[in-house]
Amino acid sequence: KAGVTQTPRYLIKTRGQQVTLSCSPISGHRSVSWYQQTPGQGLQFLFEYFSETQRNKGNFPGRFSGRQFSNSRSEMNVSTLELGDSALYLCASSLAEQNNEKLFFGSGTQLSVL
Amino acid sequence: GDSVTQMEGPVTLSEEAFLTINCTYTATGYPSLFWYVQYPGEGLQLLLKATKADDKGSNKGFEATYRKETTSFHLEKGSVQVSDSAVYFCALREAGTALIFGKGTTLSVSS
């Protein structure tokens, strides 16, 4: 069974641009979560989707948005990029949304904003 | 809101030493507790979990016990190996909310 796939693996953008990151969950998984990982702040929760509906949202500005498609694939978008958006963006999937569910993580997209 | 506090690293140990990584949490209800591990260049993977008070999670020689009275979930291993070098994250999740992580503790084991 294929794992969680995130594309692209690396991205370099300049300030003010926008970016779209993609995540394909494990087949059959209906829940997808996104996290931002930085050395200073660790892992910070962005959003969580289940069956195309946003279930939870973290404390990030409106420049960060996401969506989930009917095949459970998910995208996140960051508009008007800032230097501080440079981070590893991790996607995770799970079968359901219960609080004891194991999350399966992808290897992430490393975003560098210059 | 809910939060997780981990001991700051890095933790540096010699092979076969005893490991403890402290983790305490704040939650309004009855969360499930987790330890995730991130090996160099890889994504996070679940190491162990516990879903109610006094449960003990264990995997690969690692253990952690859900202590409601002290709101703690400390990770222990009796004899670490070089291959255990990684970043360890404590996390919690309450019903209807997202998985919340601590900032991570880097473990470095030398032979």
Image: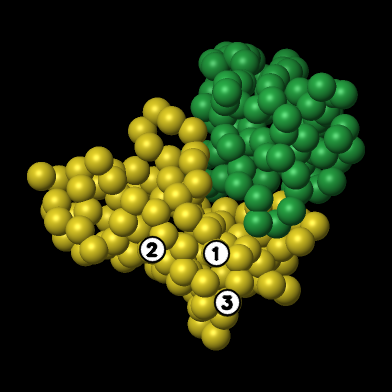
Chain colours: A green, B yellow
Query: What's under tag 1, amino acid-wise?
Result: Ala
Image spot of residue B91 (x, y percent)? 56, 57
Residue A93: give its label: none
Q: Residues within 10 Å of mark 2 (few under 14, many from 20)?
A: many
Secondary structure at badge 1 equals strand
Is residue A12 or residue B99 the one in the foreground? B99
Q: CA distance from mark 3 to mark 1?
A: 8 Å
Image spot of residue B98 (x, y percent)? 72, 52
- Mark 3 vs mark 2: which is more N-terminal? 3
**Residue B100 seen from this side:** yes
Image spot of residue B108 (x, y percent)? 25, 47
Residues at marks 3 and 2 touching, judged by CB atoms closer than 8 Å: no
Where's the C terminus of chain B, which quadrant? top left
Q: Residues within 10 Å of mark 3 (few under 14, many from 20)?
A: some
Question: Same chain for the residues at labels 3 and 1, yes or no?
Answer: yes
Q: CA distance from mark 3 to mark 2?
A: 15 Å
Q: Is residue A42 left or right of residue B94?
A: left
Query: What's under tag 3, amino acid-wise?
Result: Ala
Residue B53: give its label: 3
Is residue B109 or residue B8 the one in the foreground? B109
Image spot of residue B86 (x, y percent)? 34, 43
Where's the N terminus of chain B, which quadrant? bottom right
Secondary structure at badge 3 equals loop
In this figure, which residue is indicated by the disc labeled 1? B50
Q: Residues within 10 Å of mark 1 (few under 14, many from 20)?
A: many
Q: Spot the residue most to the bottom.
A: B69
- Mark 1 vs mark 2: which is more N-terminal? 1
Residue B63: give its label: 2
- Residue at left offset 25%, top offset 41%: B83
- Residue at left offset 70%, top offset 57%: A99
- Tag 2 subunit: B
